[in-house]
Image (cartoon, rainbow, N blue to C red):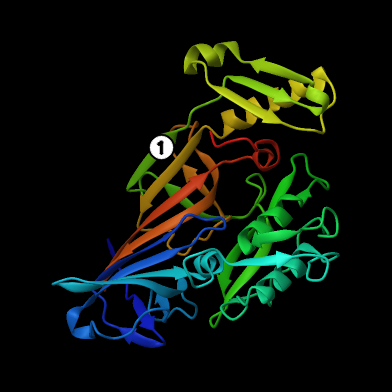
Amino acid sequence: MHEITPRICIEGREADFLEGSYKSDGGITSAELNFKLPLTYGGMKKLWNKEVTFYLNEFDSTPMFRGWIKRTNETFEDIEIMAMDAFGYMVKGGEQGQAQIILDKRTNLDGLTAGAAIKKALVLAKLDGKLKTDIIGNTLPLISSVREPLRGKLSVKAIIEQLLVKAIDKTNQELPRPNIIKIVDDGEYSQLVIELESRLEDTNVKHVFDEYNNIESINIINKKLPTVITVVGKNDVGATFTHDSALEAFDRNYLEVSNDKLTSFAECKEFAARLFQANLYNQYEYSIESFDGAYLVENEVIRIETEDPQFSGNYRVKGKGVSFSPSSYSVDLQINRKPPTLAEYISSRDN
């Protein structure tokens, strides 16, 4: 671990912690901060739902984490604290169940762009006190929630997912790109921000890692590669694509998907072949342990330089973990090379 001067504040007051860890898996999932306080802090204090901020260094102007305490456990040695960020609060609404709203002809999001619809959904769910939308922006391309209007009892998370999945940018791009939503901190509040998924080919690289200077270890996950892919189109037209050499190397693994936009055998066959190529490119996921990159955030692009050309190149940051004590820290980065096509093409199951 390398030296730092981290700070944890509870309701704005600095707490003398013993050790801790930060973890974010990216996407619309909750980031967590787990830390331990000495028993002398006062185990009887009411800590539930208190705001917690974590600064990696004492001179940082914005926190790496802002959230609210959701679990405490007092042992014979210390007090264990778990806090969740605004995504966790959005999903749970501060309670045990998911934050939900009912949309009908009287109360709805009809006609609003995705950004405006998300803003209104948070207001209707009374979540806008902790999760702000001052800089949320909008999707590219702009999409309207008037098409296929949202109706019924829906979670706020499901509403955001349904709106974003409609917005796929195909303008002047060889490959389509999905929109993502993430949280940034403005120094006072957690802010929702919509942005396009980064392009690995032309995005400015935020950090460079190599095996001699700042990579302590790399964990490579070899995902199961589908070798027999069946695609079903409109009116049950379909086709199966089998990659013979890959089947011999990786065994028989099946993937079945549906796409109502496909109307012929040839279209289904070509679609299945593109699915194979997308999965082949996304065969590996990586986890890097390092003392560098603690300030990297989801969707930023890094480059790995190694003597093996198979693993060298640009990667997208998917998630991050930081383990820390009052004087040191280490970083665990989750990265991938997921092509943008996966967001549009693969909808049946994880591979």
* Dot 1 amino acid type: Ile
Q: Classify residue 1 as left or right of residue 279.
A: left
Q: Give SS at disc 1.
A: strand
Name the residue nearer the viewer: 53 or 348.
348
Viewer-proximal residue among 91 and 144: 91
The image quadrant of residue 279 is top right
Q: Is residue 42 above or below residue 308?
A: below
The reply to whether residue 131 is visible in this rendering is yes
Give the residue number, with chain letter if any, for mark 1.
220
Q: Residue at x 26, y 81 (%)?
A: 16
Q: Residue at x 36, y 50 (%)?
A: 289
Residue 116 % position (x, y): 77, 70
Furthest residue to the bottom?
A: 13
Q: Residue 201: image x %, image y %?
A: 65, 44
Q: Is residue 195 left or right of residue 78?
A: right
Q: Is residue 20 above or below residue 258?
A: below
On the picture, is 288 further left or further right than 179? left
- Relative side of 97 to 78, left or right: right
Circle 1 Cα neighbour tier, 10 Å, few/some/many (<14 / 14–19 / ≥20): few
Identify the residue at horizontal 65%, vertical 52% (top origin): 198
Q: Is residue 214 visible?
A: no
Q: Residue extending furthest left?
A: 76
